[in-house]
Image (cartoon, rainbow, N blue to C red):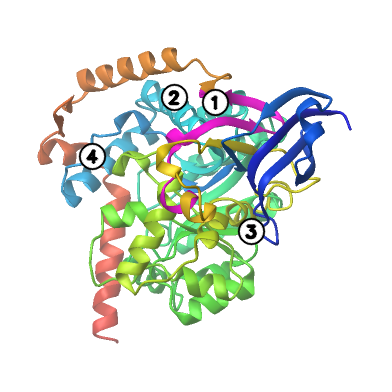
Amino acid sequence: MAADIAIHDAFVLTVDGRNRLYERGTVLVEDGRITEVRQSRDEDTVIAADRVIDGEGKLVMPGLVNAHTHLELTPLIGAFSDLDLLEMMGSMTAIYGQIADGEFGYLTEVGYKLAALNFLAGGVTTVNSQDVRPSAGAETFGEAGLRGFFGPALSDLFWDVPVDEQFARARTFIDEYHDTYDGHIRATINPHDDWSCTRELWERTADLAAEYPDLLVHTHLLELEESNTMARSNGAKDSLDLLDDVGLLNDRLVAAHFRLADDKDIRRTAEADASVAHCPSIFSYWNTDGDVQWTPVPELRAVGVDVGLGIDDHYWHDSYNMFGEARQARLAANLKRSAGQYHSMELVRMLTIEGAEALGVGDEIGSLEPGKRADVILLDVDKPKFTPLTNVPAQVANNATSADVETVIVDGDVLMEGGEVKTMDAEAIRERAESAVERFESETDWELDIGGSEPPNSVEIAHDLPKRGPAQLLGRLAFQSVRDRFPF
């Protein structure tokens, strides 16, 4: 049988319904789709294909899915690492407020390029990103041949951009970018979270979702203690009750974090067929309270909720390594609860097929099966670190890193081969990123060098923070907290 790509004599981790694993397997690709996944035959070495890849010493598996992330501030990786929590939150909010006002475009545009380059090189073939001005992200990922879900964040209590303007931008983005780049880029609707949005904004979001019934609704949900407090301020019993009231608790919902979900929340999420993106590293790094429960992923998965893994703000914890999210998910859950929270194959599935299912594309990508789009990565496992190669799922979940990825294929197109990215100019992007950070330093009071970073002082940060929205946010939370304590 003729093929465009034939990979033979490789370890093949299919992540299909039976989690089949071939010690000596062959994967055939034609017209962007996988046509065969099977045991290798001796004649596969001379199979009729445009590109034949000898898979000896390689592990073939589906491309990774980053189910929740933010990409614009990628060039500031390392800038937030050693700040305290309040410094980090204040600095980040001030910068995002300025981006919302149209500043730092040079930084965010190269941020998308740097993110795309690093995620591609690390085997991430699909991202779901919520940003402030995502047009450059859609274009960058589309041109690089990657898959991306993008949309501008909406909030009336986080920054001071008029709500009408925010929704106008969202409509423009959807109309311009949804289902572009051969379907690789899809638009999403992004109410920012359940602690900085009023009921009015949620209702407008529901109206927008009704206009575009094919789009996912991507938000942060049950992330903070303030989540349900704000929901009560919005006239609901809790966050899920609010979303149900406005008509957004359904199979289009992708909820990031979900840390504070209780048994009732888990049940309602399953009944609604909504999905969750679990981001373990960001909360392991910036945990605000050691007594706060950990995201109840085992319970969610046990009742059929699709749970993907996300790297969130990778520049807050200095890692592009999606494999690391699987390891961190295990370590944090075992530490918070007890050992044995996950089997390794569960974590591999969360990196791939369950992330795809959470984004509504599990019938297209996420596993190596005939008929699916050919999003495939090859890892070099002919290394001392993988010797002896036993328990491949555990090696992927515990030991693999971005540096082990050698070849990346999306939709049957080879985007990286032998560690060399084919669709992006890596050196030009690096130079542009370095220039952008130098300009950022010159235009702000940030100091960034090889020894660390120094943000502006608190007075300067306060000057740049949004004023109207956050003031209303804090006021609403304070008033509701009083009402909760002294009902009247």
Write the start and end of the magenta stretch as one range: 396-419
Q: Residue furthest right?
A: 1
**Quadrant (top left, top right, bottom left, bottom right) of the N terminus:** top right
Among numbered discs 3 and 1, the one appearing first in the sequence: 1
**Amino acid beneath label 1:** Thr
Foreground of the two, 115 or 268: 115
| Residue on which disc 4 sits | 80
Among numbered discs 4 and 2, the one appearing first in the sequence: 4
Q: Within 10 Å of the Cα at label 3, are there few (<14), some (14-19), or many (20+) other Cα atoms?
A: many
Among numbered discs 3 and 4, the one appearing first in the sequence: 4
Q: Is residue 279 visible?
A: no
| Residue on which disc 2 sits | 109
SS class, disc 2: helix
Expressed as whole percent of the image width and height from the top left, the position of residue 416 reads: 57, 25
SS class, disc 3: loop
* Vertical placement of residue 58 versus 105, above or below: below
**Amino acid beneath label 3:** Arg
The residue located at (73%, 40%) in the rendering is 26
Foreground of the two, 145 or 3: 3
Among numbered discs 1 and 4, the one appearing first in the sequence: 4
Q: CA distance from mark 3 to mark 4?
A: 33 Å
| Residue on which disc 1 sits | 140
Among numbered discs 3 and 2, the one appearing first in the sequence: 2
Q: Are marks 3 and 2 in contact (CB under 8 Å)?
A: no
Q: Is residue 233 visible?
A: yes
